[in-house]
Image: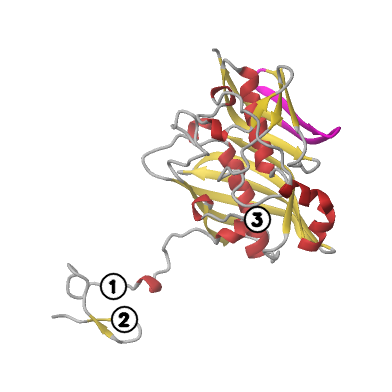
Amino acid sequence: MTMLTIRNNAPVLPLPGAEAGEPWMRCNDARGLTTTVPREYVHRSSLAEVFLTGCDRIGVDSFSLAGQWPRAHTFFTSADGTSHDPVQAGETIRQVGLYLCHAVYGVPLGHNVLLWSLDFTSRPERLRIGRSPSDLDITAVCTDFGWKGNRFSGFLEVDIRRNGELAGSGTARFSCVAPATYRRLRGERGVMGLTRPLARRTPIAAASAGRLLPFDVVLAAADRPGRWQLSPDLDHPILFEHANDHHPGMVLVEAARQAACGLHAPGGFTPSGVATEFHHYAELDAPCWVDAALVSPGHVVVTGHQEGRTVFHSTVTGAAQAA
């Protein structure tokens, strides 16, 4: 029987079916195995929600990252199940920014992220789900990434490619603050959000929100057409994947997407991009009103208001279909 040797020179038996002299590598010797980046680096508690698989530095502040979108995601999939949802591109950009902050630029994992803007566009024809998972080649350019006092901030530009073709791109502007600073910013309001959130109201019809399941709808009916109340399920495993003392930015982006769809109901609307500016925290313990207006074909402006002030402002682009 032919014996194989490994790096510590300890003899081992060949694998079943291995030919004499065939090279063999133990799992812990492999260098090219695919895995996700640490979930903590992208502020996710579930490995299934981590879309990045690797990163290489290609310049002083530019990076090449790898990623993958699953074929059957429970949330980031079109209502008919044939395509990735464009908001998944936005979530991927968010994860890129978080990963680079922690893994490359040294922002401590305990710091809180303040998202000021998120702008992304996608190409619907390149979001189609195929027979294989959607492997991603991602390039990221970081501008003004650095510390100013005890606050880290920066501006991020990202391109997402599938099979060499551009599938989505976008930007994000954010800052990171220490836990003590965040507690001072939030004060008692953060505690109230966790202890006294509003009960969820009956969601609008899933089809009018561009969703398949009522569970995924974040809007409830309001007092007039073109207006809704923000009312997601706070136990949603994707939108509220970990505890929050306010509505996360991606919930507001989803609200804008659903409001654009609702404005076109009973016709259809296929969003392709969302550009959002975040002005204030969307609190959990007070009504947040979401207003949408069609400014031109395929161009919807969505604004969120709470307690007399603008919380967020979005522009949603896409294609409308007749009822």
Asked if residue 38 can be seen in this view, the reply is yes
Amino acid type of the residue that numbered disc 1 sits on in the rendered structure: Trp
As helix, strand or loop, the secondary structure at mark 2 comes to loop
Asked if the stretch drawn in magenta spans residue 113, the answer is: no
Asked if the stretch drawn in magenta spans residue 304, the answer is: yes
Q: Position of residue 304 (x, y in %)?
A: 76, 32
Q: Which quadrant holds the N terminus?
A: bottom left
> As displayed, is residue 103 above or below residue 237?
below
Q: In this view, does 279 lie to the left or right of 111?
A: right
Amino acid type of the residue that numbered disc 2 sits on in the rendered structure: Ile
For the residues labelled 2 and 1, say whether their Cβ atoms are less than 8 Å apart. yes
Q: Indicate which label's residue lies in the foreground, 2 or 3.
A: 3
Q: In this view, does 72 lie to the left or right of 137?
A: left
Q: Position of residue 144 (x, y in %)?
A: 77, 55
**Residue drawn 52% across the image and 44% down it:** 161
Mostly what secondary structure, the magenta segment?
A: strand
Task: Report the front residue among 43 and 180.
Answer: 180
- Which residue bears the numbered disc 3? 98
Q: Give the range drawn in magenta.
A: 297-314
Q: How far apart are marks 2 and 1 (CA)?
A: 8 Å
State the image quarter where residue 267 is shown. top right
Q: Which residue lies furthest to the top in this view?
A: 323
State the image quarter where residue 296 is shown. top right
Badge 2 local density, few (<14 within 10 Å), some, or many (20+)? few
Q: Is residue 72 left or right of residue 148?
A: left
- Which residue bears the numbered disc 1? 24
Amino acid type of the residue that numbered disc 3 sits on in the rendered structure: Leu
Q: Position of residue 217 (x, y in %)?
A: 59, 32
Badge 1 local density, few (<14 within 10 Å), some, or many (20+)? few
For the residues labelled 2 and 3, say whether their Cβ atoms are less than 8 Å apart. no
